[in-house]
């Protein structure tokens, strides 16, 4: 007896859309064996092909792979309100208009799935929504942008500049022609807004996420940090703090004992911490046509199998801005007596404690690289502002956060 056909409307036929269409054809029988339904592409909408109204009429699941928010938002809302399940890989759509879309899905009694919007093929959303639905999560953090992880890995392994590493990423297809959202942290910020919303049941908006990118990272920073046993990552962190919620993206150094320290190249990795589970780590390839398409098809299979995710009740939480962190500090100074003592005096007056110091060079080429113990960021930045005015500095100080946490 042949399996019942599940008709899918496909919006977008770019790299991911084409890979998804091929994957549906290749895996149709396997999906049928798993779910009892055989997926079939009912229609395709792109600039030169298809009609959305016809696709809506002839499909039970709509897969949105257009990207951006316009016209994707309109199409997805219309599909949900028409009683169609929707699967999307569109992180900006979910991050910016999640409340509206979730409300529409709930009102219509249909599913809105978006596993591919975060961490590529790594099933972090499915794990949080389904496997950990009854678990009180305390922290979700990780490397959620493969482009920046490749760039930082390339800088560390070859010693090249940011610009050269970016060029290599573009040549290999790991970076877009316009990589701005990736390298300035906006892409990771959108993903962390989604993860925070799911993990904590809180209506987190993209504007609630503070983020920094990697464009100011210098080869010297990575070289000196390697002497201190550190590796550099662009990290996204969402965690409960002081009765509220903190969601941030920032470049930071990790010590070797951290599970994310060895994650190299265009890979993503996400960790979830909770009292009941201690911590779990998920890793795998980040963005890519086949990888993203595989995550999209996984969502389709979940819908066909009737595996409904548990959506936690919304619990507005105050966004906490002030944090406690350790820092790496890079200073270019004139090599003269009393320099280190004056810097130590400023740090001491602001109650910033030094963990380690590396000094290199002489005369006009002297450099001090320091790592601080963890403490309130406001104190460190107050000290940094005072240090920047000292007459022996030859360039603006560079500061990068350090995660002191290690896992044994």
Image: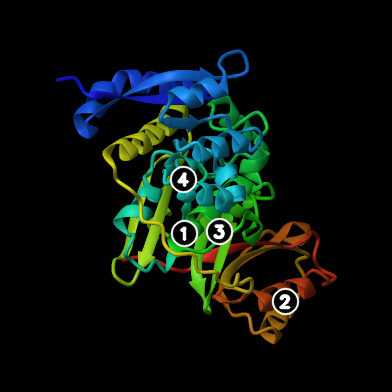
Mark toward the start of the polypeptide (3 vs 1): 1
Q: Is residue 407 left or right of residue 288?
A: left
Q: Dividing the picture into quarters, in which one does residue 39 lie?
A: top left
Mark toward the start of the polypeptide (2 vs 1): 1
Query: Residue placed at 44% from the left, 60% from the top?
Result: 199
**The N terminus sits in image quarter:** top left
For label 2, the SS is helix
> Compared with residue 240, is residue 104 higher up or lower down, i.e. above or below?
above
Query: Residue placed at 22% from the left, 31% from the top?
Result: 36
Q: CA distance from mark 4 to mark 3?
A: 43 Å
Q: Dividing the picture into quarters, in which one does residue 333 lie?
A: bottom right
Q: Is residue 81 left or right of residue 221?
A: left
State the image coordinates of residue 137 (x, y, percent, origin top left): 39, 66
Residue topped by disc 3: 252
> Compared with residue 406, is residue 289 higher up or lower down, i.e. above or below?
above
Q: Nearer the viewer, residue 370 or 250?
A: 250
Which of labels 2 and 4 is toward the front? 4
Residue topped by disc 1: 229
Which of labels 3 and 1 is toward the front? 3
Residue topped by disc 4: 108
Q: CA distance from mark 1 to mark 4?
A: 53 Å
Residue topped by disc 2: 383
Callout 3: few (<14), some (14-19), or many (20+) C-alpha neighbours within 10 Å?
Answer: many
């Amino acid at each position: 007896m042949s399996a019942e056909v599940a008709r899918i409307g496909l919006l977008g036929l770019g790299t991911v859309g084409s890979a998804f269409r091929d994957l549906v054809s290749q895996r149709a029988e396997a999906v049928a064996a798993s779910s009892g339904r055989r997926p079939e592409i009912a229609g395709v909408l792109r600039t030169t092909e298809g009609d959305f109204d016809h696709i809506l009429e002839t499909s039970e699941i709509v897969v949105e792979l257009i990207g951006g928010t316009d016209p994707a938002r309109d199409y997805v809302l219309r599909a949900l309100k028409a009683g169609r399940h929707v699967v999307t890989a569109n992180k900006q759509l979910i991050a910016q208009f999640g409340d509206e879309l979730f409300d529409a899905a709930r009102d219509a009694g249909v599913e809105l799935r978006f596993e591919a919007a975060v961490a590529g093929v790594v099933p972090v959303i499915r794990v949080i929504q389904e496997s950990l639905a009854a678990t009180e999560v305390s922290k979700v953090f990780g490397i959620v942008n493969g482009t920046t992880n490749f760039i930082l890995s390339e800088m560390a392994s070859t010693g090249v500049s940011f610009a050269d590493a970016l060029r290599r990423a573009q040549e290999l297809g790991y970076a877009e022609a316009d990589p701005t959202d990736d390298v300035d942290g906006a892409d990771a910020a959108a993903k962390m807004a989604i993860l925070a919303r799911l993990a904590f049941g809180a209506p987190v908006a993209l504007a609630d996420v503070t983020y920094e990118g990697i464009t100011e990272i210098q080869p010297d920073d990575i070289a000196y940090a390697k002497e201190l046993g550190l590796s550099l990552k662009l990290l996204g962190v969402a965690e409960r703090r002081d009765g509220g919620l903190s969601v941030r993206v920032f470049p930071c150094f990790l010590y070797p004992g951290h599970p994310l320290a060895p994650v190299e190249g265009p890979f993503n990795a996400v960790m979830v911490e909770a009292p009941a589970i201690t911590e779990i780590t998920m890793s795998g390839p980040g963005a890519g046509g086949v990888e993203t398409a595989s995550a999209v098809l996984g969502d389709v299979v979940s819908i066909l199998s009737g595996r409904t995710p548990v959506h936690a009740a919304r619990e507005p939480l105050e966004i906490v801005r002030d944090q406690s962190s350790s820092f790496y500090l890079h200073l270019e100074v004139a090599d003269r007596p009393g320099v280190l003592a004056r810097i130590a005096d400023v740090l001491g007056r602001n109650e910033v404690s030094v963990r380690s110091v590396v000094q290199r060079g002489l005369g006009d080429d002297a450099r001090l690289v320091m790592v601080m113990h963890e403490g309130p960021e406001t104190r460190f930045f107050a000290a940094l502002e005072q240090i920047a005015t000292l007459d022996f500095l030859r360039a603006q100080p560079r500061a990068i956060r350090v995660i002191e946490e290690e896992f044994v």
